[in-house]
Amino acid sequence: MLALTEPAAEAISALTQSQNEQQQGSGLRLALTGETDDLQLTLAVSSEPEAGDQVMGTEDGARVFMESRAAEFLDDKVLDVQQDEQGQLNFAVYAQEQQQGQA
């Protein structure tokens, strides 16, 4: 199953709280778009999961909704957040073994 780093969980919580203050239970929705040879992972704040989505949450309240193809693709991955040179936060996905090697 997809693993979340603590910074990613904090970023998801901040995103969903700031964009959906009135919407309890909102989360970050991950979906795959495109064809087999040109798949892209899309991320969007969603007020609720769509039918068939896998839902995961953290103790801190961060929620992630994954459409079925995205859940399968992300099964052995880690979702992290990294800061670029301009100070912007960007989500990054990598294999779980890479995270363990960095620890």
Image: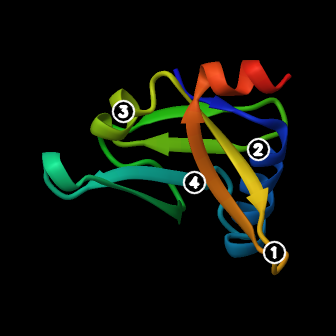
> Which residue is labeled 2 in the image?
9
As drawn, is 19 to the left or to the right of 85? left
Q: Which of marks 1 and 4 is nearer the N terminus?
A: 4
Eye-nearest disc, 2 or 1? 1
10 Å crowding of disc 1: few (<14), some (14-19), many (20+): few
As drawn, is 89 to the left or to the right of 67? right
Q: What residue type is labelled 1?
A: Glu
**Could you say which disc has been placed on residue 73 in the image?**
3
| Distance between the alpha carbons at the discs numbered 2 and 1 | 21 Å
Are circles 1 and 4 on residues that touch, CB within 8 Å? Answer: no
> Which residue is labeled 1 in the image?
85
Q: Which of marks 3 and 2 is nearer the N terminus?
A: 2
10 Å crowding of disc 3: few (<14), some (14-19), many (20+): some
Q: Quadrant of the C terminus?
A: top right
Which residue occupies 64% across, 43% down? 63
**Could you say which disc has been placed on residue 28 in the image?**
4
Which residue occupies 68% across, 55% down? 24
Of the pair 47 and 71, the residue shown nearer to us: 71
Q: Earlier in the sequence, mark 2 or mark 4?
A: 2
